[in-house]
Amino acid sequence: MVSSTALIYDEEMMNYKLLWDDPECAIEVPERLSCSYKRLHHYELVKRCVQLPVREATEEEITLVHSPDYLKVVKSTQTMDVEELKRTSKNYIAAYFHQNSYRCAKLSLGGTLQLVDAVMSGDVRNGMALIRPPGHHSQRSQSNGFCVFNNVAVAAEYAKDKYNLQRILIVDWDVHHGQGIQYIFEDDPSVLYFSWHRYEHGSFWPNLRESDYDSIGKGKGTGYNINLPWNQIGMGNADYIAAFFHVLLPLAFEFNPELVLVSAGYDSGIGDPEGRMCATPECFSHLTHLLMPLAGGKLCMILEGGYHLRSLAESVSMTVRTLLGDPVPKLSGEMTPCYSALESIQNARHVHAPYWKCLLHDETRLLQDISTKGLSAAAPSHVDASIVDEFLESHMKKILHPTPCISTCVVAPEGHTHTQLAGVQVEESILSKEQAGAAISVFNQEDLNNESLLISVGKMLNALDKLVSRQTKNCITLSPNASLSTAVAIQHVLHLGAERVFCVIIGDMDTKPKLTNDGKTLLLTVSGDKTPERINSHHETFLKWEERPGEGSSFFYALFRFILPLAYSYQPDLIILATSSNRSIGTKDIALINSLLQGLAEGAFISIVPENEVETIEVLSNVLVNCTSAMHFGPYLPPSEECMQNLKEELAVMQTEWRMLQCLAN
């Protein structure tokens, strides 16, 4: 199995800079690359990546998107003096040229295409291109916003042409709208383009009406252009994660791309003088993690903006850590999206509802009277870089912890052969049969003479000790009684001092866990049966969801609309996911929820499975050991009206307490 991450970097791309005084362009400096690469070295990430050689893009590749006349202009800058360069630059908006711009732009684009080739050929699983100049603003015949060639747009056309791809997702998390990508693909249904961007009702650069939520594409491409405008500054972790859950991911999973390209601009991060947003570096770890199950893991990150050097470098590093499969750090801050973010989310969902089956049963309304409309845009204020540097220095030390030496601990019956994977350690030590019996007796006296169960529970208790103390990253327990093991597991981790335990039960369990009323547990049951009476108010919830027989599943929508927002609201420090043989969702759905929930609790995760579920065990072993496993989870179907009604009923109860569930501005 491919398990490597590519890194594209060549210091030659720093060999151009602004040669005259221009305050608008002065922030785009060579150090953007060098500081990012240096920080990757600091975290010892460079040596863990596959470093690919960078080549120049050919003229044929450049003209997949750009006009021959524009190529001729860029090419001619190689022999210009400073005054000629200045005059040529003034023909475009927020652009500048240098004698080395053409060479560096060819390397920037060529490096991007090298990454696409490596990922598509299977030489690597995913990768990051640290390149310069950026690209998402450049258009067919125009340089724009520091961009020369549109690296991501050319990469999409290149991938379609060379690999015969039919569906490519482009995610643009730069703080500026990538209007160049939008213009190139706005009538093309083979490319789904998503951009969030600082907008402030058109008062923020590039000041375009077509950057608003209602620009959704043209002709056959209608519905394939998703704009999420931020109408105020200060958007943070909760706003970005909510945008993914409630807008991007449901549509992206229905689209089911064959390749994901990210215009990875980190001016949307904390401290950036352009964005003036508040997302901390680990937020980009979570965004990356949420994209990794798409396209069988074929994910290419392409650097765009980012102008606070420390914030940029830390955010790039967090992205690469996640691509490599390291535990995702806990998100900081309260998980409550702001009102302005909810307004933008609501309007984006509303205008796209007619074009996406997963939104078919949505009840949305358009907000005409936006709360921020009519307010004058705040004048840009100075961002004290040193204060941000000091914050990031202490913040990164708080959120980064050593990765456990053991990836996955497995509790399995004697002679079990379905967990022979690198990174798996089979648990042989038993806490003691007496302690196992004492734990079981709280729930069931009849099973105290069941030798197999006593051994299984004893081993599981020992594995849980290692999980809570972070000696191991995650755990799989193959149990002769998954229901009882789940109840015992909850009881034991609470005894060990776990403060917030999120337990997801898939199917029907005979043994009822003993839950606390102090917020230390949150229990979600997903079942095809009628939901029982709610006992623990906002800390116990039931989702009635049953998949229709046939190809595909609609469970992805429940994941993004309900389960993950609930989990991110709760911010657990340990996750227990238990499955029974009597369940209403399939093995791929269970694998997907296992994969995505690993983004929480720094990956501290135990999956409890009936020991006779051979297929489930094999799949979960791969997912837990290789959280970036190249597994294809699709195809995806729209949820049934009955499932949607069940979902709406639970939302009505739970969203008053857990605010990440909200996607409407009321």
Image: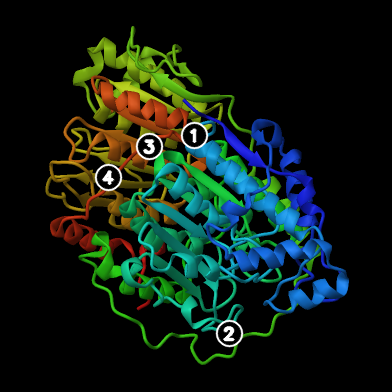
Amino acid carrying mark 2 in the image: Ser
Q: Nearer the viewer, residue 593 or 268?
A: 268
Secondary element at image label 2: loop
Secondary element at image label 1: helix
**314 horizontally vs 428: left or right:** right
Residue at numbered disc 4: 635
Q: Position of residue 346 (x, y in %)?
A: 36, 73
Q: Position of residue 545 (x, y in %)?
A: 19, 49
Callout in the foreground (2, 1): 1
Say few, some or many: other residues with alpha carbon within 10 Å of mark 1 (under 14 / 14 to 19 / 20 or more): few
Secondary element at image label 4: loop
Which is more N-terminal, label 3 or label 4? 3
Q: Is residue 560 above or below residue 185?
A: above
- Mark 4 to mark 2 CA distance (whole Å): 40 Å
Residue at numbered disc 1: 121
Amino acid carrying mark 3 in the image: Ile
